[in-house]
Image (cartoon, rainbow, N blue to C red):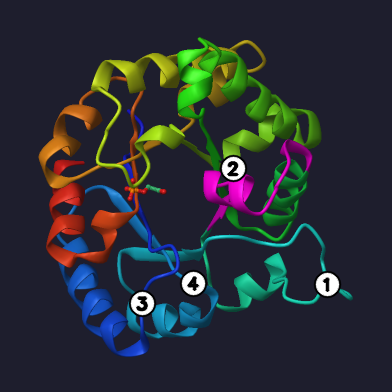
Amino acid sequence: MRTKLVAGNWKMHGSLQANQALLARVKDGAAGFKCLSAVCVPFPYLAQAQSVLAGSKMAWGAQNVSEHAQGAYTGEVAAAMLVEFSCRYVLVGHSERRALYGESDAAVAAKFAAALQAGLTPILCVGETLAEREAGITGEVVTRQLDAVIAGSGVAALGRAVLAYEPVWAIGTGQTASPQQAQDVHALIRRRVAGSDAGVARGLQILYGGSVKPGNARELFAMPDIDGGLIGGASLAAEDFLAICAAA
Ligand code: PGA
C-alpha cells in the first residue's frame, strides 16, 4: 500500500498575517492524520512555514525552482536555497508555469534534475488541456511530459519523486475529472513507468489535482491508482484542506 499524500499549492496567495493562522491550524489538524501532508507556499513565506511547521507532521515546499545551481539568473531561486529552508517538496512543471511562463518539457526535466540533485522531492505535474482531451491525445501528452523527465534523469529517479496528474481544464474551474477519468490516466502513467521499472511503478505516488474539494476527495482517493491530491483553492481554507486530508 502506498501512503497517501495531500499537498497544498497556495499559488500566489497569502500574507504574513493570514498565513500565520492558516499554518497553525493545518499543523494542529495534520497531527491526527495517517496520510502525509505538505504545503507549497510562495518563496517569501518559506521561512514562516519553516518556523511554524518545524517538528510537526506537515512538510513544506516551494512551487518552482531554477534548473541552475547559481549564477547570473536574476529572479530565479536555486534548489540549494530551498534546502536551506528545510523544504521537502518542490512543484515542477505546474501547468501554470508551462502555459504562462513558457516552460518546455526540456526545462521541466532540467528543473526536476536540479531538485533531485539537491535532495528535494520534486512533485512533477503533468496534464492535458481541454483541446488536447477533446482531440483524444491525453495519453500522448502526458506520456510526452513524463518521458522528457525519464530521458533526463532515468526511470529510477521517479522513485525519489512524486507525480501529479492535473488536467488543465479541471484546475481552478470547479470542473473535476471524474474518479474514473482520473483513474484511467493514473493507470496509464503507472503502466508507462512499469514498462521501464515495475518496482518504481508500484511505489510511485501519483496525486490527482484539479478542483479537489472536501465533497469529492473521498471518491477520488478511493481509486486504486490515486495516491492523494494536489490541492489549489481548497488549500487556502484550513477546514477544507483538513477535510481533504481526512478523506485521504
Ligand atoms: P485547484 O488547483 O485545486 O484550485 O483546481 C490545483 C492546482 O493547480 O494545483
Is residue 206 covered in magenta?
no
* Type of amino acid at the residue the image marks with label 3: Gly
* Type of amino acid at the residue the image marks with label 2: Arg
**Sequence order check: which comes first, mark 2 or mark 3?**
3
Q: Which mark is residue 160?
A: 2
Q: Does 217 appear above or below 193?
A: below
The range drawn in magenta is: 90-106
Is residue 102 covered in magenta?
yes
Quarter of the picture holding the N terminus: top left
Question: In which image quadrant can residue 153 be found?
Answer: top right
Q: Are marks 2 and 3 in contact (CB under 8 Å)?
A: no
Q: Are marks 4 and 3 in contact (CB under 8 Å)?
A: yes
- Quote the CA–CA distance across marks 2 and 3: 29 Å
- Some atom of ligand 1 lies within 8 Å of the CB belonging to the residue at label 2: no
- Quote the CA–CA distance across marks 3 and 1: 26 Å
Q: Does 215 appear above or below 239?
A: above
**Sequence order check: which comes first, mark 4 or mark 3?**
3
